[in-house]
Image (spheres, rainbow, N blue to C red):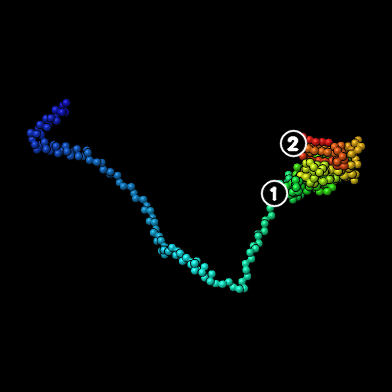
């Protein structure tokens, strides 16, 4: 309140004395200008860094403009046709042959499957050509010559053509027969005497009926065995008497085969098998799980 009164007195005095009032207002105006003037930056500018090198100017090579290709004139087919028509053929020209030799046909590719028993060395065999013979045949036949037993190869009396499944079942069966011969007859197997493997025929050599498993290389006939000491044991002559050493061995071979194959037929099955053991892997029963062991 006191300050307001003092300012009011000064204002009255300045009005009464114009010169004094004007000087006082000028000073007040300068103070206001100084207070409202923008602040000036008194800091010194930062030192200038190194000037980056100027990028060299590379002149582009002068290349002559490439002109678009000029299309060739269209041939005059009509004129050429007329000229050819007017030109008579030469008298000594040979006529063109109408027969064109057909390209030689490439042989059909043969697809066959490798047999694990052969790859692993359980049997000695080679792959044969596919067989197609009426209702008979096999795509990947094996020609087997020997079977592994107790660390050595036991040869077959003659090579037999059979399937991979049959070849794979032989080593386990031969090893059992070989072990029995060594233990009970004091002589190991030297040879397996075989009959036919693949043979395109009907069952029991009949004129009607189903194709035999031999027709699919899925069967093998065994006529007997030869021992290392030279003895030969044949199904036809040694099956009886059954209590003799040879008869016991043949029955052991028969019974052991029933654990490896689905069909085993011997002399007691029928007269057609009085001189050999028939082994195959045919399907029996609805689920192919039935066995025939006679």
Q: Position of residue 236 (x, y in %)?
A: 89, 42
Kindly tell me whether residue 174 is visible in this rendering: no
Nearer to us: label 2 or label 1: 2
Residue under the image location 67 percent in, 59 percent down: 104
* Residue beneath the point at 76% across and 48% down: 133
**Image x and y of residue 140, in percent:** 73, 47
Mark sitting on residue 288: 2
Choose top left, top right, bottom left or bottom right for residue 152.
top right
At a point 89% along the width and 39% down the height, the residue shown is 239
Front-most of 291 and 37? 291
Which residue occupies 73% across, 44% down?
116
Q: Earlier in the sequence, mark 2 or mark 1?
A: 1
Label 2: state its secondary structure.
loop
Numbered circle sitting on residue 210? none
Q: CA distance from mark 2 to mark 1?
A: 27 Å
Horizontally, residue 21 falls left or right of residue 275, namely left
Residue under label 1: 111
Closer to the camera in the image, 54 or 166: 166
Marks 2 & 1, CB-CB < 8 Å contact = no
SS category of the residue bearing label 1: loop
| Image location (x, y in percent) of residue 35 | 22, 38
The C terminus: image quadrant: top right
Residue sitting at the far top? 1
In the displayed structure, would residue 109 be above or below residue 27?
A: below
Asked if one can make out residue 86 in the rendered structure from this viewpoint, the answer is: yes
Is residue 3 left or right of 66 when viewed as pictured? Answer: left
| Image quadrant assignment for residue 67 | bottom left
């Amino acid at each position: 309140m006191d300050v307001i009164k003092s300012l009011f007195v000064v204002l009255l005095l300045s009005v009464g004395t114009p010169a004094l009032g004007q000087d006082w207002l000028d000073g007040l105006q300068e103070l206001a200008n100084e207070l409202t003037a923008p602040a000036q930056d008194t800091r010194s500018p930062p030192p200038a860094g190194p000037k980056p090198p100027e990028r060299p100017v590379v002149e582009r090579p002068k290349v002559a403009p490439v002109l678009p290709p000029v299309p060739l004139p269209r041939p005059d087919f009509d004129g050429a046709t007329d000229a050819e028509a007017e030109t008579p053929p030469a008298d000594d020209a040979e006529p063109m042959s109408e027969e064109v030799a057909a390209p030689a046909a490439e042989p059909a590719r043969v697809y066959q499957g490798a047999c694990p028993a052969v790859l692993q060395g359980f049997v000695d065999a080679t792959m044969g050509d596919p067989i197609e013979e009426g209702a008979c045949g096999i795509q990947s036949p094996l020609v087997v010559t020997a079977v592994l037993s107790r660390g050595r190869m036991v040869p077959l009396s003659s090579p037999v053509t059979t399937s991979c499944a049959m070849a794979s079942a032989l080593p386990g069966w031969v090893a059992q027969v070989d072990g029995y011969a060594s233990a009970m007859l004091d002589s190991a197997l030297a040879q397996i005497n075989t009959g036919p493997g693949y043979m395109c025929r009907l069952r029991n050599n009949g004129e009607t009926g189903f194709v035999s498993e031999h027709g699919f290389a899925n069967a093998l006939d065994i006529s007997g065995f030869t021992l290392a000491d030279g003895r030969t044991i044949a199904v036809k002559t040694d099956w009886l008497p059954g209590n003799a050493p040879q008869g016991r061995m043949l029955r052991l071979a028969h019974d052991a085969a029933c654990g490896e194959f689905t069909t085993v037929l011997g002399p007691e099955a029928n007269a057609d098998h009085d001189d050999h053991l028939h082994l195959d892997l045919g399907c029996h029963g609805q689920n192919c799980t039935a066995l025939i062991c006679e």
